[in-house]
Every structure is written in C-alpha cells, then in structure tokens.
Amino acid sequence: MRTNVDVLVIGSGPGGMSSAQYSSRAGHNTMLIDPNGQGGQLLFIDKIENYPGFENINGYLLSSYMEKQCESFGVSFDMQKAKKIEKKDNSFFVETDEGEIKAKAVIIATGATHKKLGVKGEEEYFAKGVSYCATCDGPFFKNKRVVVVGGGDTALTDADFLSSMCKEVTIIHRRDSFRAQQALVDRVKEKANISFAMNDTVKEIKGNGEEVTSVLLESGKEIETDGVFIFVGITPSSSIVEKLCKLENGFIKVNENKETTLSGLFACGDVTTTPFRQVVTAASDGAIASHSADEYISSHSFTS
C-alpha cells in the first residue's frame, strides 16, 4: 500500500514536530512517522526551564502541546518505522514496516541517543540525579555535589559550567590524561571546587529509591553525590540516510538552510552537525528545514 504526501517528516521530537507544523501550515500535505510515537527525548525530561514561554514545564507536557498544535494544522501522525529511502526523479520513496510512502520532500529528524555507561543504577536513576545534559539539568543542582563522567571536550566544558553553580564537581575519567583541548583541561584544573578521579570508572550508581546518593568506582572508592552527569558521547540515528547524503562522524551534514547534500532531503535537530543541542534549537532547526522544503517543492515539478 502506498501513501502519497508532499512532505514526510521522519522523527517526532521537537525538531520533527516543529518542521511538520510549519510544513502543514504552509499548505503541504504533511505526514510525520515515528515507531515510538510523539515526543522523542522530550518524554524523558522531567523539567525544562529554558524553553521560551514556560518558567518550568515537564517534557511530556511540552510534547503534548506540540502534538496538539501539529494536529490543529492537519499533520498526519503514524507509528511507522522507516526502513529504506530511495529517490527517483524528483520524488522520494520511503519503505516502512507498513508499506510505502511517496513524498516530494523528506525531513530527517531522528535525533541522537546518549551513549550510556551500562552500569547498575543508571537506568533506575535517570532523571532522578542521572543526566546527560548539564545545560538542561545543571541548575537543579545548585549548591549541591555532582560528578561528571568523561574526559572529552563536552565533559570538561560541562564540568566547568557546573562548577559555577554546584558546591563540588568531581570528574571521573578512565585514563590518566584527558583527550579534551588543553585550554579546557587547564581551565578545569584551575577551579577550586573541581576534583578528579583518574584511571577509574563507575561501577554502580547508588540511591535511596528516589534520588542518587553516591557512585561506586571500580577501585572500590565511593563518592557521595547528588547528581551524575554522563558525557561519554552520543550516537546519531542516521543509518537510514548513510548512503544518500554526506555524514560527518555519523551526523548528517547540513548547511544553514538544513539542506543535506541530496536535493530534496533535509535534516534538523540532534541528528545533524549542529554545535548546540537543545529543545529550542531543534525546534528552530525544524522551522528552517520546513521552509527550505517548501521552497524546494515550489521550484520543482513532480509526477503523480
């Protein structure tokens, strides 16, 4: 069974729903598909206090508002999984687990997943002290103790950021030296409230059932803490387009208009080569991608 649409959005996080909303509002028959339903990573964020217009909002609630807004403009939602994308002439043919979708333009908004430590307590205390985003959650730990796991640029940048508001920051790194830029290394070493646990790894994240209380290291050392910030990398969900457009370290390369290297294929949010990954920037990316898709459709002819 084939479904014909003007714009197909793959991925329903803030970037995907923003692009779908703008596309449908522009008069295009727009479909958004995601096998996991609407929301993406938003569904796992307990509190968001840096999204314009909301002093403090739950991620699930913000997602539901976005979904209702999309529906009000006529966006069609479906829990299909995209398996393969092909372009023939000026049209895209997307094979899903339920059939085929033909689209004039496709917007990829599949996001990225944070790499996890895979240790006991990590899943149990996610959003209860365990976080993968200092910008998102750091302010909740003002004047508290936190640990940062990782040794790259992101880990040290966010450790520096956390040190400005947290009482104590301990960086845990598996090696005896950092792989981050030397300027970042020098900066964190100058901070009086940042300490280090080198040549060690996290064995278990402990808590009282409600929140994190400590981390147990492989060396046997236990560090009391209120929060655990994990920065060991992210994995972009870009495999579906790896043979269609250019990637950089797995992330989809886009220009300022969110155009990929394949005409008619656009991308937005965390799956792209963006320098800053936030809910608000993903939503902005989505709006730009939909505008570019609109211009693409307007300037090309398509067969029925």
Image: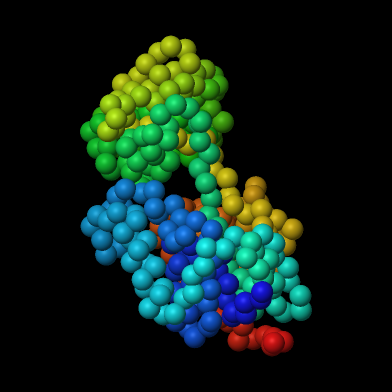
**Is residue 127 left or right of 258 when viewed as pictured?**
left
**Is residue 131 left or right of 250 when viewed as pictured?**
left
Residue drawn at x 35%, y 24% is 206
Image spot of residue 116 (x, y percent)? 51, 36
Image spot of residue 268 (x, y percent)? 53, 63
Q: Is residue 114 visible?
A: yes
> Of 290 and 37, which appears nearest the observer?
37
Residue drawn at x 47%, y 12% is 219
Q: Is residue 261 visible?
A: no
Image spot of residue 241 (x, y percent)? 68, 59
Residue drawn at x 29%, y 30% is 209
The quarter in which the C terminus is drawn is bottom right
Q: Quadrant of residue 264?
A: bottom right
The quarter in which the N terminus is drawn is bottom right
Q: Is residue 121 above or below residue 161?
A: above
In the displayed orientation, state which residue is furthest to the top: 220
> Of 213 and 148, which appears nearest the observer?
213
Q: Quadrant of residue 61?
A: bottom left
Q: How is the image coloured?
A: rainbow
Image spot of residue 68 (x, y percent)? 36, 71
Q: Is residue 284 above or below residue 90?
A: above
